[in-house]
Image (spheres, rainbow, N blue to C red):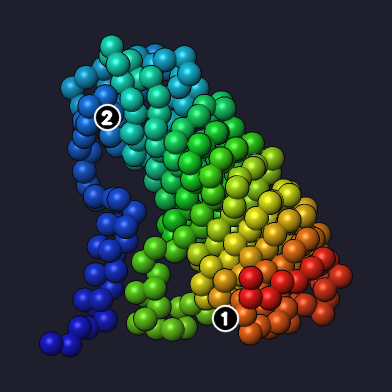
């Protein structure tokens, strides 16, 4: 039987929910040993109620559960480690609350350390957080996400889960989708990986930026990229006036002007080009 466009669109929505670990309309509490996963629980500065239990906070996690973060944590999914009716550690946070251009949702973590962060919303500003694993930006972030004073030991990954299925319905989607603007200030990471079209701005000196797949990325950053890696011959990268690239890595069979859209204007900002390595 033929699949209609409407049926495919419905499938894409369900697939996106699955890929983003979302279950619409649920506030289920999952307990696995000392780890508790929950969504949208009520809290005060001193206690939080998860299901039918109330917990206090270890001092190391208290800066997350502030009144200032109430909006950011509205609908957020968290996994925490508990012991003796106290939250000892916040393992992962998925932010699901979107703001607007004039008033982004601000999540200020007071330099608390978590294992993973997922920004699954639009117009979100994350401040003063330490992430030992990866920080992911999903396709729910369509316009702007900001990181200020964030230290990511792993990678920042800008993804576009579910978009491939939509693009197969209409290839023009991929051409029209300019993607999210990611703004970095005083933020560190091992590798910034673009698996979706996006714009990068702010100030940083990344060790590695990787552009994966058929995407278009504008690097309007102020700073120096030690290694810019492009893995697909059909990717397009635009360099801003204030960014320098120490080493540009390109796929075999390509040349810089094939991939760097404004190469003639910015060739002096690129130190060395390596092809096929």
- In the image, is 34 to the left or to the right of 140? left
Look at the picture and state if 258 lies above or below 148. Answer: below
Which residue is farthest front?
277
Which residue is farthest left?
1
Residue 139 in sight:
yes
Q: Residue at x 75, y 64 (%)?
A: 247
- Residue 234: image tag: 1
Q: Which residue is mark 2?
A: 36
Which residue is farthest top?
84
Q: Nearer the viewer, mark 2 or mark 1?
A: 1
- In the image, is 80 to the left or to the right of 243? left
In the structure shown, which secondary structural element does the residue marked by tag 1 occupy? Answer: loop
> Residue 171 appears at what percent x and percent y?
43, 84
Q: Which sits in the foreground, 39 or 245?
A: 245
Q: Tell me whether the residue at label 2 lies in contact with that at label 1, contact meaning CB atoms closer than 8 angstroms.
A: no
> Residue 179 appears at what percent x and percent y?
54, 65
Look at the picture and state if 155 lies above or below 168. Answer: above
Q: Residue at x 47, y 50 (%)?
A: 136
């Amino acid at each position: 039987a033929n699949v209609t466009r409407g049926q495919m669109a419905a499938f894409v929505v369900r697939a996106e929910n699955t890929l983003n670990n979302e279950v619409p309309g649920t506030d289920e509490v999952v307990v696995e040993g000392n780890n508790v996963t929950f969504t949208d629980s009520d809290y005060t500065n001193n206690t939080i109620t998860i299901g039918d239990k109330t917990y206090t906070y270890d001092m190391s996690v208290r800066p997350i559960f502030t009144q200032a973060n109430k909006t950011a944590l509205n609908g957020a999914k968290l996994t925490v480690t508990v012991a003796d009716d106290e939250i000892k550690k916040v393992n992962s946070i998925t932010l699901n609350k979107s703001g607007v251009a004039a008033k982004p949702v601000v999540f200020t973590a007071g330099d608390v350390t978590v294992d993973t962060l997922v920004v699954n919303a639009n117009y979100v500003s994350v401040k003063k957080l330490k992430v030992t694993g990866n920080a992911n930006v999903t396709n729910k972030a369509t316009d702007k996400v900001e990181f200020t004073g964030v230290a990511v030991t792993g990678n920042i990954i800008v993804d576009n889960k579910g978009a491939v299925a939509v693009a197969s319905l209409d290839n023009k989607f991929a051409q029209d989708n300019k993607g999210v603007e990611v703004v970095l200030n005083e933020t560190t990471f091992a590798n910034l990986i673009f698996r979706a079209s996006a714009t990068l701005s702010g100030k940083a000196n990344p060790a590695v930026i990787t552009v994966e797949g058929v995407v278009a990325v504008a690097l309007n950053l102020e700073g120096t990229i030690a290694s810019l890696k492009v893995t697909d011959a059909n990717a397009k990268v635009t360099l801003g006036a204030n960014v320098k690239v120490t080493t540009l890595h390109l796929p075999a069979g390509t040349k810089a002007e094939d991939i760097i859209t404004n190469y003639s204007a910015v060739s002096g900002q690129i130190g060395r080009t390596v092809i096929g390595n």
